[in-house]
Image: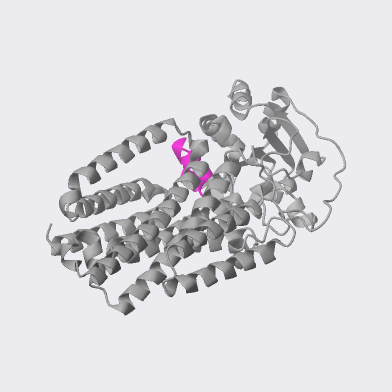
């Protein structure tokens, strides 16, 4: 393919990617935005395939294999498993960056050896291009390789840990090692020292060691973050994978990979910053894995959890004039969004004011609850953000919490030693009555006790959320 056509295709794909990112900020435009992204990726793939010379057949074969694997995974993964799937995909981006960096160094060594042997004319492809680079260009390439391997290795192991925590395969509690910050600083300095040796042409062993050390750092950083903060971690790792891709793009001299990597990296960083503000966290502390640890003993909780049956819930809703629903990950696990939507429809048909309160980090992925509610065809205009609904909760008759814990936990305001201390939460306890749909009396994914469940105006509606709501629907007409 002519280089001009490739450049034009890359520009078109970039525009489509930007439109996709812009459209995802609006629920009504999100579906069209996804199609923009799909079209952009298709154009990018075709342009890359047909600009690759004689390697078209194996490239198409590998794309077909990867596409088949992706299709199988996509069909098997439930909506509740999307956060861990995203984390797993991030790990693959990081691993690819490491392999590409190592391969680039091997090719550079081959080119250098061919020049010394006077056999540069026998080289082809990327190795031949490296043979014609100036010393300055080769030095810049080493910086790109070093950064790609460093960021890629951190992204790879960090994403694996995030996947394990989200999937319940690794304990969600933060792992706090003695002198953990000193360990991270020492590892960072070690990587810089090895990078200096690599720039002085000490050999590929230096960047292999960088990959190993950075991998340990990635593991340690994410292990030190508690489960309550994992939504921020996913966004942060998304940013890391973007910067790893951008570094890889520089190594491969691929303009589109540079641009798309920068788009992913910057958008992920911006989202991480927004989420940190929403959770009252320090952005730099997130990057360094320095939050999520309890600084002292948690406050004791007094009282008991009072259960309520279906008849009691129906009577409570019948007497209410205003209702606010707060969905969380438990709603996603139970696949209760359709039942929630039907309950909302019936309550509104009876003339009651019904709205949703959505916390910025509800679920285990930003926007998780919005997607589920949109899937159940809940009207957009009654789905409000935390800041919009909190001021109305004191005048609300019934606040219904569906499978949430941390985002409605008053300990964030009352207990300075809580892992979520200072995090803005939905103040549902200020409503006249609070109804909590919960499987049992456990602490949930994050392992944090919630004093809300013991308050005098709170009632516990135990059981699977969908089954409980379906039973309730038989008495709400």
Quick one: quadrant of the N terminus? bottom left
- In this view, the residue in front, 230 or 223, is 223
Q: Is residue 377 magenta?
A: yes
Query: Is 174 placed left or right of 265 in the picture?
Result: right
Examine the rendered structure and indicate whether residue 356 appears above or below residue 423: above
**Residue sitting at x 56%, y 47%:** 162
**Residue sitting at x 61%, y 63%:** 288
Give the main secondary structure, helix, strand or loop, of the magenta stretch: helix
**Which percent across, then down, holds residue 375?**
45, 37
User: Can I make out residue 401 in this image?
Assistant: yes
- In this view, the residue in front, 21 or 306, is 21
- In this view, the residue in front, 133 or 169, is 133
Examine the rendered structure and indicate whether residue 303 appears above or below residue 272: above
Q: Residue farthest to the front?
A: 117
**Which percent across, then down, holds residue 71?**
35, 35
Q: Does the magenta stretch include residue 292?
A: no
Examine the rendered structure and indicate whether residue 352 appears above or below residue 242: above
Q: In which quarter of the image is residue 198?
A: bottom left
**Which percent across, then down, holds residue 402?**
63, 37
Examine the rendered structure and indicate whether residue 151 appears above or below residue 406: below
Give the residues drawn in magenta, as a range: 366-381
Q: Quadrant of residue 74?
A: top left
């Amino acid at each position: 393919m002519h280089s001009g056509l490739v450049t034009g295709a890359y520009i078109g794909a970039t525009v489509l990617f930007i439109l996709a990112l812009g459209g995802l900020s609006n629920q009504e435009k999100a579906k069209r935005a996804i199609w923009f992204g799909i079209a952009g990726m298709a154009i990018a793939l075709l342009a890359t395939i047909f600009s690759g010379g004689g390697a078209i057949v194996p490239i198409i074969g590998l794309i077909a294999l990867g596409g088949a694997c992706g299709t199988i995974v996509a069909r098997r993964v439930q909506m509740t498993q999307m956060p861990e799937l995203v984390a797993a995909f991030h790990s693959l981006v990081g691993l690819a960056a490491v392999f590409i960096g190592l391969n680039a160094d091997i090719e550079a060594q081959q080119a250098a050896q061919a020049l010394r042997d006077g056999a540069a004319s026998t080289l082809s492809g990327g190795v031949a291009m490296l043979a014609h680079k100036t010393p300055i260009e080769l030095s810049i390439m080493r910086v790109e390789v070093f950064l790609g391997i460093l960021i890629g290795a951190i992204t790879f192991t960090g994403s694996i840990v995030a996947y394990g925590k989200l999937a319940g395969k690794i304990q969600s509690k933060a792992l706090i090692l003695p002198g953990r910050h000193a360990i991270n600083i020492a590892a960072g300095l070690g990587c810089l020292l090895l990078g200096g040796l690599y720039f002085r042409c000490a050999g590929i062993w230096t960047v292999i060691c960088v990959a190993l050390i950075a991998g340990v750092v990635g593991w340690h950083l994410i292990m030190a973050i508690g489960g309550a903060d994992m939504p921020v971690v996913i966004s942060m790792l998304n940013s890391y994978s973007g910067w790893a891709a951008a570094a890889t793009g520089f190594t491969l001299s691929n303009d589109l990979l540079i641009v798309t990597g920068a788009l992913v990296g910057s958008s992920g960083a911006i989202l991480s910053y927004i989420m940190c503000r929403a959770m009252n966290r320090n952005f730099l502390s997130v990057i360094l894995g320095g939050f999520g640890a309890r600084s002292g003993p948690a406050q004791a909780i007094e009282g008991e959890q009072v259960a309520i049956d279906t008849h009691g819930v129906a009577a409570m809703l019948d007497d209410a004039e205003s209702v606010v629903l707060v969905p969380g990950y438990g709603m996603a696990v139970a696949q209760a969004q359709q039942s929630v939507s039907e309950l909302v429809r019936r309550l509104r048909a009876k003339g009651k004011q019904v709205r949703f309160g959505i916390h910025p980090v509800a679920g285990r992925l930003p926007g998780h609850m919005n997607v589920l509610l949109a899937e159940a065809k809940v009207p957009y205009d009654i789905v409000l953000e935390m800041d919009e609904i909190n001021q109305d909760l004191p005048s609300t008759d019934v606040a219904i919490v569906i499978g949430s814990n941390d985002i409605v936990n008053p300990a964030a305001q009352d207990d300075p030693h809580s892992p979520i201390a200072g995090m803005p939460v939905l103040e549902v306890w200020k409503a006249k009555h609070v109804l909590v749909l919960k499987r049992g009396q456990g602490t949930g994914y994050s392992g944090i006790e919630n004093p809300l469940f013991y308050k005098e105006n709170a009632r516990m509606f135990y059981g699977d959320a969908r089954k409980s709501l379906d039973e309730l629907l038989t008495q709400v007409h």
